[in-house]
Amino acid sequence: MSKPAFLIQWVRSLLFVGQAYFMMLVIGLLYFPWALFSRHGAMAGCHAWCVWVRWTARWMVGLETEVRGTPPTDEVIIAGKHQSFLDIILIFGAVPAGKFIMKKQILYTPIIGQYGARIGCVAVDRGKRTEAIKKMVREVAEGSAHPGQLIIYPQGTRIKPGVKAPYKVGTGVLYKETGQDVVPVACNVGLFWPRTGIIRWPGTAIVEFLPRIPAGLELDEFMQRLESDIETHSNRLMAEAGFTQIEA
């Protein structure tokens, strides 16, 4: 890409990112009265913003988005490949009642914190992932957890396309202790929406819901299957987009 073309794409990306965050505030405020009194209102507001981002990405920066497979609608754990903020938007926007484990400090962020609490996110102190797992297990056992799809990222952070990173056992602990199925999700979104920076590249960003892993497997078998499914299909999606630099 020539320097002028890169500069144009960067400016388009800057405008896209700016309006996306501005519209997060606008949509959040519009749905806020409903969200305060109804979890459905909070979900509707979050889903509306996801739709807005996908729509504006298409015509502002040339970024198409696609969701493949069958998003779950029952109470399951969704374990996804995490490459950028876009996979969060696409996965959450595709399921009826998504929720996350989030830092407790976010609860005190105006609007965002209230939405997080209303959709059923599990708030924990920074760095206390074990506490989050115990809290989730306890709430599921007590029947006090909000029903829905818990979205987690087994590698724990955003991973640059092509880079290998270990899968953490916390996902396996949740799988064993809750007795829930796990739906793996592969993606290639980091090729078009990097984990850092302003630039957004044209193309087709994809998340793919894979066949679920049924409850009841031994921990080691589950972890091996989870990593194999996600990595194999993510590599295929990236290769489909023309990316071949997979780390050995």
Image: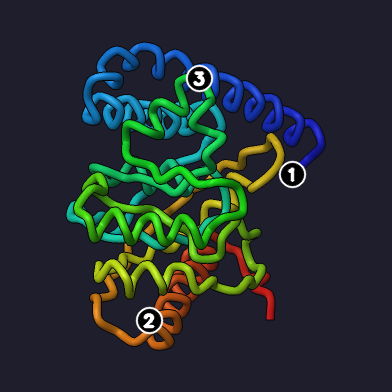
- Counting other residues with Cα less than 10 Å from the Cα at mark 2, is it few (<14), some (14-19), or many (20 or more)? many
The residue located at (57%, 48%) in the rendering is: 84
Q: Which amino acid does label 2 sit on?
A: Phe
- How far apart, in angstroms, are the residues tagged by discs 3 and 1? 40 Å
Return the x and y of residue 166 as percentages of the image width and height. 60, 74
The location of residue 61, given as percent across then percent down, is 56, 32
How was the colour assigned to the protein in this rendering?
Answer: rainbow
| Label 1 SS | loop
Q: In this view, does 231 lie above or below 78?
A: below
Rendered image quadrant of residue 30: top left
Give me the disc on residue 110: 3
Q: Which of the two labelled residues, at mark 1 and mark 2, occupies the earlier sequence position?
A: 1
The mark lying in front, picked from 3 and 1, is 3
Is residue 240 in sight in this rendering? no
CB under 8 Å between callouts 3 and 1?
no
Q: Assess whether mark 2 and mark 3 are in contact (beta carbons under 8 angstroms).
A: no
Q: Distance between the residues labelled 3 and 2?
A: 39 Å
Residue at coordinates 38% horizontally, 53% vertically from top-left?
A: 151
* Above or below for 56 versus 178: above
Q: Is residue 146 left or right of residue 226?
A: left
Query: Which residue corresponds to the image point at 40% horizontal and 34% vertical from the top-left?
Result: 116
Which is nearer the eye, 223 or 84?
223
Q: Are marks 1 and 2 in contact (CB under 8 Å)?
A: no
Question: How far is disc 1 from disc 2 in space, using C-alphas?
Answer: 43 Å
Query: What residue type is disc 3 on?
Result: Pro
> Residue under circle 2?
222
- Secondary structure beneath dot 2 equals helix
Q: Nearer the viewer, mark 3 or mark 2?
A: 3
User: Which residue is found at the position 60% from the left and 47% from the top?
Assistant: 126
Instruction: Decide: few, some or many residues near mark 1? Use Cα within 10 Å; few <14, some 14-19, many ≥20.
Output: few
Which comes sooner in the sequence, label 3 or label 1? 1
Disc ID at residue 114: none
